[in-house]
Image: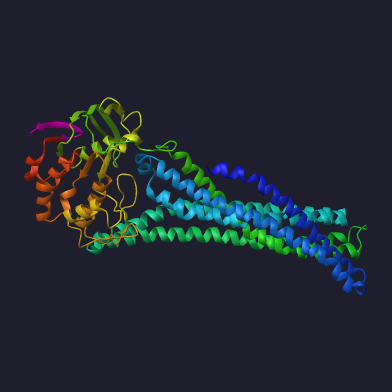
Amino acid sequence: MFRHILKKSIPLIFLSVILSCLTSMLSIYILAQIKDHIVVDESTISISFVVQLLMPVFAFFILGSLGQITLARFGAKSICQMREGLLYHVNNSSYFNIERMGKQKILTAFTQDINCLANTFTMLPHIIYNFVLVVFCLGYLFFLSWALFVSLFISLFLIIIIAFFLIKLVVRHFDNLRELQDTLYFNYNIAIEGSKELSTNYARRNHVYKDIINPHIKKMYKQECKAQTYWSLSNNWNLSVVFLALIFMVFLSGKISAVNSYDIISFSILIVFLVSPLNFLSIATQEIGRGMIAYKRLTELEDTFSPRFIGNFQPLIDSRVSSTITIDNLVFRYKDKAGRDFKLGPINLNIFPGKIMFLTGGNGSGKSTFIKVLTGLYPSKSGEVTIGDTIRLSQDSARFSEYFSVIHFDFFPFNFLLDSKGNLIDNCNENFLYWINRLKLDDVIFLKNGLVNTTNLSQGQRKRLAMLAAILEDKPILVLDEWAADQDPDFKQFFYIDLLPELSRLGKIILLITHDYQFFDVADELVEFYDGQIVKNINR
């Protein structure tokens, strides 16, 4: 995507170069006319001379504005497409892939890399104009006096070698700074997401801020200082180049008999005129370096995405499953955070329509992993899951996943509610009014313009809001990971004794991970996991 957008920009960049060439020629023409009238004969400067130059100035304004506005608008459009494209990749990539990449890397791409690239695109029209202007000015200097130009070129060549070395250091240090930003976002996440635990534990809070976050901030400070120091040296060296070249040229002019004072004055005026575009190009090197680094990171990130949804995805499902879900030799392998291999399966299981199945077992036994594999979030190593005889997990995991409404243990609460057709629900929806009352949320939330008025709820209420969303979506299979853990005793009993049987009577298959053994008799089937295997399967 990012490469494609860059390729599409080539014709407009070429057009901008042409317009910049025209405006640069006009700039040099206007400057040459003014210089000639000053150097040759000041008395020739009159009203007619001013009027004579108005047309070139007007043409300069029109052509310059046209080129820069065209490229600037295209740059804004390209950045918009990049943001949409990155979001598309995230939205259509597999959860397993996103989990492996780490959310801090994706967040940095959204908040840092895209913005850096946007700044580079914004400056691109001005960079092109000033670069072309410098090239044309050098060409005009050659036209004025090739001897002086050669002396100028020799001095510039030696000086630019040093400038190139400084620019390489600038880019390298900004690249290192960009790598540190990923870790910084991760550390910020620790401070924000772990604020409850840190607030009640001084030793842990002190370790996080003193030994983890602050040292990293200081490391970034040192890296930022290095990058900015080399950039400042590069910027000021590039400005000094103009005066060094002027001094060197004047020195050599005394040794060259073919050079007269008129040529020296003309060269001096043009070289001083070049100070502004050279200064801008020098400043632009920082943004160009950041933009190159951002482009590199974005393309690397794009290459790691694996699309899960292909084409115009339209889920074609019924709100009921009338066939048995058959799990045949399902196997999944992965390495845990400690680098140890974990194997789930082989799992063989039948899940019948309208039944309630409880999944139990100790922590780390494989229950949540089984749910993620079953719903298509994790790719299975081998085996198959089928609904009836036609719907297979291995053939299209994205479409298969559409049969499930899942509330994970670490769920995310959305601030909108959708019906089974994907439309926003309003306060007048009868289904919404019924279930908001059943879930005891009628005094807590309401909808305004299709949005929930607040997500500032207790954990138990947030889970009920997630349950409300799942019920209103009306998917045939409801999967809950320790959903009742944060409910008060009265609502927990209501959930097991009344709510689950009611949902079952609606024809839904219910899979519930739970440790509430006192309610095990509610289940039609009880499945116990241990070390990635089913060790007990009790039908009631």
Q: Residue at x 51, y 48 (%)?
A: 82
Which of the pair 5/515 is nearer the observer?
5
Which of the pair 466/258 is nearer the observer?
466
Which of the pair 160/268 is nearer the observer?
268
Task: From the top left corner, tell me how far across and down residue 475 is, in percent.
Answer: 26, 41
Q: Is residue 365 visible?
A: yes
Q: Is residue 340 visible?
A: no
Q: Is residue 288 magenta?
A: no
What's the image's color scheme? rainbow
Q: Quadrant of the C terminus?
A: top left
Q: Residue at x 30, y 56 (%)?
A: 426
Task: From the top left corner, tell me how far across and down residue 115 is, in percent.
Answer: 51, 55
Magenta segment main secondary structure: strand
Answer above or below: position of 43 versus 171: below
Q: Is residue 538 magenta?
A: yes
Task: From the top left corner, tell me how far across and down residue 30 is, in percent.
Answer: 82, 63
Answer above or below: position of 520 versus 112: above
Quarter occupied by residue 367: top left
Numbered range of the magenta stretch: 529-540
Task: From the top left corner, tell me how far across and down residue 159 is, in percent.
Answer: 71, 55
Quarter occupied by residue 382: top left
Q: How many marks?
A: 0
Would you say 21 lies left or right of 297 here? Answer: right
Would you say 155 lies left or right of 352 here? Answer: right
